[in-house]
Image (tube, helix red, strand yellow):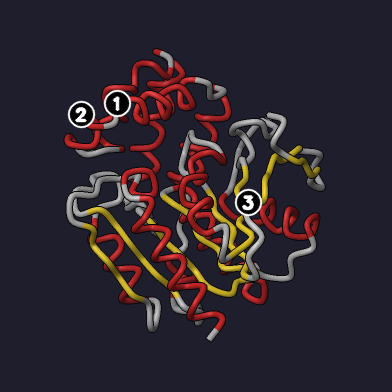
Amino acid sequence: MTDLSFVETQDGTRLGYRVVGSGPARVALTHSLAMDHAFWLPVAEKLADRAQVLVWDCRGHGASGKPEGPYAVRGFADDLAAIFDAIGWSDAAVAGASMGGCVTLAFAERYPDRTAALGLFDTTAWYGASAPQDWEGRAAKAEAEGLSSLIAFQKTRWFGDAFRAAQPEVVEACVDVFLKNDLAAYGATCRMLGRADLREALEEIDVPTRILVGEEDYATPPEMSRMMASAIAGSVLTVLEGGRHLTPIEFPEVIADEIAQLIGEVQS
C-alpha cells in the first residue's frame, strides 16, 4: 500500500501506518480483528482539521508483518508505542474498536504517560470465563474450513440489518479485507483475545474516557461496557441505538464526535 509508511519493531516486525490530517491534537486509532488501517479512515478524515490522526495495521494484519504467534495485547500496545517513537509523538488520545479497544486499554496500562485520553468502542476488558474456548473455536473453524466459512456470521455481528441493506458496498469492502487475512495470524489473534484480561488496568485509568457500544452488539454486549464504565472513574458511557459491533463504520459521524469531545477535554 503506497500510502503507508513503515517502522520496524525490536523483534523485526514491520508495521504499516499512516497519519491523516494536520490539526493541533494527536489521536491514535486501532482497528478491530481482521480489519486494517482503512477501518478508521472515514472517522480520521472527519477529524483531520482538528488533529493528526494515526491509523495503523496491527501485526498479523493488513500490510504489517505476520510473525508466528503467540500474540499478546500488551505486545500490540508495545507496537503502537514503537510507532509513536518513529513519528516523534510523546502522547496522544488513544482509541480503538473491538480488538483495538483491548489494545488501547493495554497501551493505557503500559504507557500511562503517553495516554492523554481514551476512546473505547464496541470493546471489553475481558471476554469472560469461557473466552479461551470460545476464541479457540473461532480460530479452529477458520483454520479447518477457511475464512469464508465465517462470513455469514461476521456480517450479522458487524452490522445491523438496515445498514447491510442500505450500504452493501461497505459491507463487501469489509468482507474483502477479512478474506485477505493470513490464516495463521488470524488464529493467533483470536487466541490472543481469548487470553486477554485487562480488568486490573481499569481502576488505574485517570484520563478522560469515552465508552460507546451499539445496543445490538452481540460480540461485546453493552453490559461489558457498563462494567468498564463502572470501573473507570469519570468515564462517559453511550449506548448507541441501532448500533451493532462496528459502530465506527456504521456511524462514523457519531464516533468522530465522541473523539472530538475527548480532544476538547484534553485541550481545555
Circles 1, 2 touching at the beta carbon (< 8 Å)? yes
Which residue is denoted by mark 1 in the rendering?
168
Which residue does the image show at 78% across and 57% down from the upper left?
87
- Find the distance from the CA under tag 3 to the CA under tag 1: 26 Å
Residue shown at 60%/31% (left/top)? 62
Is tag 2's residue or tag 3's residue first in the polypeptide sequence?
3
**Label 2 CA crowd tier, 10 Å (few <14, some 14–19, many 20+):** few
x 73%, y 59%: residue: 84
Three-letter residue code for mark 2: Ala
Q: Nearer the viewer, residue 136 or 154?
A: 154
Which amino acid lies under the numbered mark 3 shown in the image of this protein? Val
Residue for badge 3 = 20
What percent of the width, then of the height, locates residue 32? 46, 43
47 horizontally vs 20: left or right = left
**What amino acid does circle 1 point to?**
Pro
Considering depth in this image, is 169 or 123 the residue closer to the camera? Answer: 169
Which label number is shown at residue 184? none
Q: Is residue 151 left or right of residue 32?
A: left
Residue positioned 39% across, 49% down in the render: 248
Pointer 2 residue: 165
> What is the CA distance from the residue labelled 2 to the residue labelled 3?
30 Å
Number of labels in the image equals 3
The one nearer the camera, 198 or 174, is: 174
Q: Nearer the viewer, residue 165 or 113?
A: 165
| Residue 63: quadrant of the picture | top right
Mark 1, secondary structure of its residue: helix
Most extreme residue toward the bottom is 268
**Picture quadrant of residue 162:** top left
User: Could you say where residue 68 lies in the image, as x and y percent from the top left?
Assistant: 67, 30
Which structural element holds mark 2? helix
